[in-house]
Amino acid sequence: MLKNKIRKSDGIIFASPVYAAAVSGDMKILVDRLAGWLHTMPLIGKTAGVFSTADSNNGDAVTSYLNKMVGLMGASIVISQNVFIHFGTLLLKDDELLNSVLKEGAVKFWEGMGGKLEYNLEQEEYFHIQNLRFHKLLEIEQQYPGLSFGEKRIWEEQGYFKYNSLQEVIREKNI
Ligand SMILES: Cc1cc2nc3c(=O)[nH]c(=O)nc-3n(C[C@H](O)[C@H](O)[C@H](O)COP(=O)(O)O)c2cc1C
């Protein structure tokens, strides 16, 4: 259900509080449920925003984990932001300041939705590796009739077989 909603959306925001220097348990469960997408990359063509909130520390641990997960699922990440509610001398204790920081992040996400999709080298390399893997599975299927790999079928349905890079998918699918 949630998976379908994500699949249908143009953009997704992943946000988590910092709990004991990591993502919240709920967010970890969600990422684990979506872990198959780390192979099939269905978020290619979608825009994503990543946010963490924390009392004072380890926001980076959360945003870098979520950036990696969402990025390897194929999304183009346009904003990644840590918000520290108490920082040293209660920097963001002020609700107005907190809201303005979040609003700025939301505006960047919204602007990114209409912009050019950007991908980093790690994402390109990852696409390449998955593509090689699925080509190998295709060969195995051809060798052993009757064998059918589920994730390979998804790669095929998404139309990724004919592309050599992530940039090519974006360019030729016109997304
Ligand atoms: C179980 C738990 C662990 C937490 N661990 C941290 C932490 O390691 N570092 C930090 O800066 N804040 C920590 N916090 C504070 C939360 O990140 C902060 O209150 C949060 O961003 C707001 O989330 P909430 O809406 O669930 O309270 C923790 C809070 C809880 C409940």
Image (tube, rainbow, N blue to C red):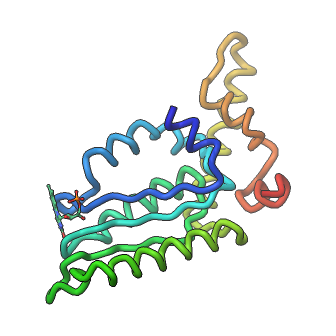
Relative to the observer, which residue lies in front, 13 or 92? Answer: 92
Q: Place residue 18 in its image quadrant.
A: bottom left
Residue 93 horizontal/vertical position (percent): 21, 80
Image position of 162 (left or right of 38):
right
- The number of numbered badges drawn on the structure is 0
- Looking at the image, residue 125 lies above or below residue 38: below
Residue at 75% x, 21% y is 142
Instruction: Pinpoint residue 61: horizontal percent, then vertical percent.
Output: 30, 66
Q: Is residue 153 visible?
A: yes
Q: Which of these two is toward me, 68 or 127? A: 68
Residue situated furthest top in the rendering:
146
| For residue 123, side relative to residue 140 (left or right) | left
Residue at point 44% right, 56% down? 14
> Residue furthest toward the bottom?
89
- At a point 72% along the width and 12% down the height, the residue shown is 145
Q: Residue furthest front?
A: 96
Q: Quadrant of the C terminus?
A: bottom right
Is any atom of residue 128 visible in this view?
A: no
**Residue 74 relative to residue 68: left or right:** right
- Nearer the observer, 122 or 45: 45
Residue pictured at 55% horizontal, 63% vertical: 122
Q: Position of residue 115 (x, y in %)?
A: 71, 71
Q: Nearer the viewer, residue 161 or 12?
A: 12
Quarter of the displayed picture in which ligand 1 can be seen:
bottom left
Where does residue 144 sit, x and y in percent of width and height?
A: 69, 15
Residue 31 is drawn in which quadrant?
A: top left
Q: Is residue 126 left or right of residue 173?
A: left
Q: Is residue 30 above or below residue 141?
A: below
